[in-house]
Amino acid sequence: MNVNDQFQNMKLNTVGIKDISYPVKIREKSGHLQDTVAQISLQVSMPKRYRETSLSTFLNVLNKYQDDMSVSIFSKLMLEVKEDLQAESAHMEMIFPYFLQKKAPITATSGLMEYTCKFADGVGADEDFILSIWVPGTTLCPCSKEISDFGAHNQRAEINLNVKFNRFIWVEDLISMVEVSTSCEVFSLLKRPDEKFVTEQAYKNPMFVEDVVRKVAESALAHPDISWFSVGVESFESIHKHSAYAFVDSDDLLEVDASDK
């Protein structure tokens, strides 16, 4: 066998498509379908005897399922790709903006809030479905409130929650779990009575990023359908050049509990 033949028969870790923008419909908790545009990456692990893959296979399967891209569809989609290409395994990630109508706290003025979501799953070697969300929130510094005669610095934060679950969980429910764990929720549209409310609400509920992480973690640990989670919070500090950050993985929490026994 010459060198060229040897390279041709080399087994590759993964082949596929990466970051393709694709229109999809996402099923909402209300039962409606929401149109959005996702960034999709889909890879397969091929046996060494196969030298090539057909990109048309990936796109044909995406075309087939784009009108109802739900969590339950994911495994079916990847299984079809795996079988069509006789692959050893398949993995897919889809990240997309998800919009919810959200009413202001006092005037009930309605506006669209954008949240970033990701579905990630695999068939074969990696079969754990992970649902990820990125949720904006407000944090108000407890130290600033404690040492100041009036006022306290506050800032927008971003909370990233990733979960595995035993039974289906709606994105909307996870978003709510995160939003109530901040100093105050963020809204897309506020009038003056609403601004007064959110400012005072945050002031009455000061939280470090560590506090937000702990509160989200407590809710996730108490949820009967969540089998694993990780949560990270980044606070874009208003009086510092840097951001503040905290993170926890539920596996680490379980290890700590086990060591205490």
Image (tube, grey):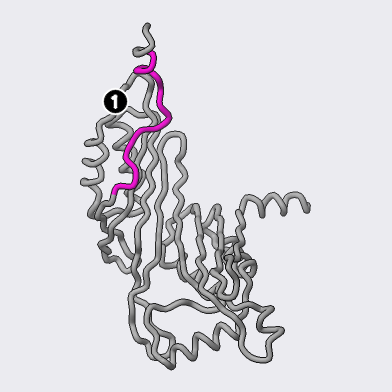
Foreground: 245 or 137?
A: 245
Q: Taking 47 as reference, is 179 left or right?
A: right
Whether residue 178 appears in magenta in the rendering, the answer is no
| Amino acid at circle 1 | Glu
Instruction: Give the secondary structure at mark 1.
Output: loop
Residue extending furthest toward the top = 1
Q: Position of residue 247 (x, y in %)?
A: 60, 58
- Residue at image x 62%, y 79%? 206
Point out the residue furthest to the bottom here.
193
Q: Which quadrant of the figure has residue 115?
A: bottom left
For the residue carrying disc 1, how many other residues have a C-alpha within 10 Å: few (<14), some (14-19), or many (20+)?
Answer: few
Residue 80 screen position, x and y as percent: 29, 37
Q: Residue at x 46, y 38 (%)?
A: 126
Residue 129 coordinates in the image, percent (x, y): 44, 48
Left or right: where 74 falls relative to 139 = left
Q: Quadrant of residue 194?
A: bottom left
Q: Is residue 47 above or below residue 4?
A: below
Viewer-proximal residue among 87 and 142? 142
**Residues drawn in magenta:** 6-20
Question: Which residue is more in the foreground, 123 or 225?
Answer: 123
Query: For the image shown, how many numbered marks are present on the structure?
Result: 1
Residue 12 among those drawn in magenta: yes
Residue 27's place in the image compared with 201, above or below, is above
Q: Which residue is mark 1?
A: 52
At a point 40% along the width and 62% down the height, the residue shown is 116
Q: Residue at x 58, y 68 (%)?
A: 241
Q: Is residue 209 above or below residue 1?
A: below
- Work out which quarter of the rendered image holds the N terminus and state it: top left
Residue 120 position within the rendered picture, expressed as x and y whole percent measured from the top left = 42, 48
Extreme right residue here?
A: 261
User: Residue 14 is drawn in which quadrant?
Assistant: top left
